[in-house]
Every structure is written in structure tokens, then in C-alpha cells.
Amino acid sequence: MPEIMYSAASEFVAFVGIDWADRTHAWALQAAGSTKIEQGEVAHTPETVEQLVLAWRQRFPNGRIAVALEQSRGALIFMLSKYEHLVLYPVHSTSAANYRKIFRSSGAKSDGPDAEMLLDMLVRHPDKLRPLRPDTVETRTLQLLVEDRRQLVNQRTRLSNRLTADLKLYYPQVLQWFEEPYAPVTLDFLERWPTLEELQRARPATLQRFLAEHQCRDEAKNQNRIEGMRKAIAATTDGALVTAGRMAVMAAVHLLRQLHHSIQQYDTKIDELAKAHPDFAIFDSLPGAGPVMGPRLIAAFGTLRDRYQSAADLQRYSGIAPVTEASGQQKWVHWRWSCPKFLRQTFQEWAGLTMQDCDWAAAYYQVQRDKGKSHYAAVRALAYKWIRIAFRCWKDHKPYDDSHYENALRRRTPAAPENASLELPIAWISCGGFQKIVSKNR
């Protein structure tokens, strides 16, 4: 192991590399100014980690200790982040794997050598790694909640698809009578009448009262539903299929009801945190934000204004910016694979929603489609542009003003008539190393 390279690392009294695992973590330590490497293991419990960190603190009572580990979020990094004298350097798994191949062409992974390898990265290239800088408690809480909420929504979708598949086997008419399988009215209906035989024993007045209690106010539609329920024919008479289907549907109804309640609780807490956030007015002003995407955008940008030096940093980090590769005379462009998937999903879904409220966004999307791009490629291109706009609003602490942006577009196209609509075809042009949108009639 070479001597320590001093630069940004000179402020540290020791360097540590940790290869984390589920039960036991391997660590390698090198004191500043020394070439000796010490190695050991620590069990994954708060008590044993506390003992190890206190031992390091007693040995190095003054100064800070740099710690590199192949984890940006997880139990170990959260456990270590409470110690103020530790400066954590998350290492991306792809970077660690590529660095590992320098010393082991097979790429073979082993806990002890991997801890030493992470230590080597930290000692040799401290300026290439970024220390972990936690955002405010409020922002990090919002970040965790919006991600967890999305996981619950995904679970609801999976269960809803399973419920739909089960109903198609023995009770398909329910999918015609109600639009959403996970809607409260659908769940209540299935809980009360889980089979067609049980439904057809109910009186029309009972069905009418049920629909009225669930705010189904379209009288004509209700009459058609009740008439369809009365005349419906069983999809199958196989007792085994009906019995198994009934059990599966009742289980799905119970789980979906619990998920629906949990999602509502998340929505309440997220709304409370978002409205109290200092940047709420900025992101609430953006088209398509709303009660769901607004908090997700707050979480996406965070509070630390110096985290991203330019909009391009965020575009690349989120995976919205494409990657260009070149070798010899070949050149190709592809989308970014290594990126925070939830962050990219947030920007793509938000960009898709902006087309409903913003004329120029809808026009720009249509231009991309007219060029032959797929729907998702066109939405990513629109998200690329929206990130630049939202980034400027975020940096300047100013809400988005659609008229201000439209006026900026008109100033860039002085040859256009004064009454020109922003729905005119538009396109990208290169200007000073950047891409900007202009009218094709300029």
C-alpha cells in the first residue's frame, strides 16, 4: 500500500474502508502518515459498531476519520452517520467493481480484500469521491416518505392486477360494473357479494341503496348496473374454481383495503411536511406538480443549493441526460443505466403531467413525436428541459411563472409575429454549448 496522498485528505487523522455485509462487516484502517494497514471485523449490531467507533475515537482523539463504504443508503451508513467525527464517502457499486478489476481481473469479490480496496480508493483518490452531506431532517423525511408511498402504490397495482385476474376466472362482470378494482366501492361490493350467486340473492332496493351510499349518483348508470347484475350469467359452474376464486378475492380485498388506508396516511403526512417546507411555493407553482408530484420534486431537488453546480449535473445524476460514447469512428447514444431509478421516474412522470397544463410543453412533446421518437423518449426530452427550468427557479428561490417563460421564448424569436401562438412547431438549436428551444419559423 503506498503512502497517503495529501490534498483534500490532509484534514483526516485516519482512513477506513468497510466492506459491509448482512451480519459482519470487514474493515481496514490506515492512520494518516503511515503505510501500515490494520484489518478486522465487526458484527452488524448497534452495540458492536458503537464499541468499534469509540475505540477509533480513543485512538485518534483529535481530528476526523474518513470512511469509505460501498453503500449510499442502508442500515450501516445510517448507523455510522450519527457520529460527527466520521466523514462518510459512499462508493458506487459499479465504481467499486471496476476498481476491483484493476487488481483482480476476474472481478472476484472477497470481504477482507474489498475493505482494503475501498481504503486504497479513499487514500489514493480522495478528490474523486464525494463525502456524504445529509440534507435537513425535514427534507430527508419527505424523501423517505415519498419513496415508501410509491412502493405501496406499486404493491397496490400488483394486488389489483392479481384481483383482476382472479375475477376474470369466475366473476368477470364486476370489472364491467366498476372502473377501478382497488376503488373503495369495488372492494366493499366484493366483500359483501364475492360471488354472482350471492349477488343475485340481493334485492334491487338493497343494491340501489349500496350504490347511493357510495356516491354513485348517475341514476341511468346505476339502473344499467342493477339490470346487468340481475341478468348476469355465471362464467363457470366449477365449484372448485368458484371456491378458490372467492377465497383469493376476499384476501385481495382485505390487503387492498389496508394498503388504501396506509396510502391515505402517507398522503396526509407528506402533505403536512411539504406545505411546511421552505421550497413548497417554488415547486407548487410548477405545472403538473399537484399534491403527489409536488412533494416528490421537493425531495428530488433537496435543500442544499450547492449540491448541484448546474442543471446539467442534475440531468446526468437523475439519468435524464443521455450518455454519448465514442470509440474510433463509432459514436452512439444511449440512456443512463446507473442512476437513482426513483429520481428518474419522478422527472419522467412529472414531465408527462405538465403537458395537460402547459401549452408549450405539449407542443414540444409533439415536435419530438413528429421526429419519430417514441412516447417515452419524447417525455424524457421534455423532462430534460423541465429540469433546467425548475433548477433555475430552485436556485433563484422564485416560483415558476409561465408567462415569464413564454415572454423569454418570444424574445428569442423576434421574427415571429406578435400574436404568434406558442403552439407553433418548435425545435432545439445549439447555442454556446447548450441546447435551447426556438420556433421553427425564426
Image (cartoon, helix red, strand yellow):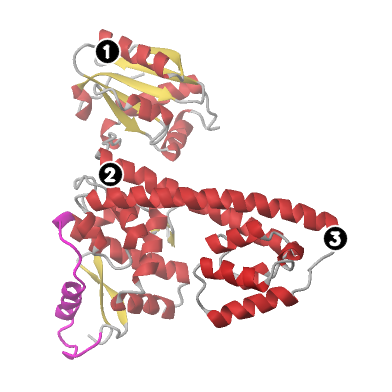
Among the two numbered marks 2 and 1 on one chain, the one whose residue lies closer to the N terminus: 1
Residue 203 falls in image quadrant: bottom right
Mark in front: 3 vs 1: 3
Disc 2 from disc 1: Cα separation: 30 Å
Residue 227 falls in image quadrant: bottom right
Residue 428 position in % (x across, y down): 29, 74
What label does residue 238 carry, if any? 3
- Is 220 situated left or right of 7 in this image? right
Which residues lie in the magenta part?
395-421
Identify the residue at image location x=59%, y=59%.
188
Which quadrant holds the N terminus? Answer: top left
Residue 61 position in % (x across, y down): 21, 11
Q: Which residue is mark 1?
A: 57
Q: Is residue 424 above or below residue 116?
A: below
What label does residue 139 carry, if any? 2
Contact flag, marks 2 and 1 (Cβ < 8 Å) = no
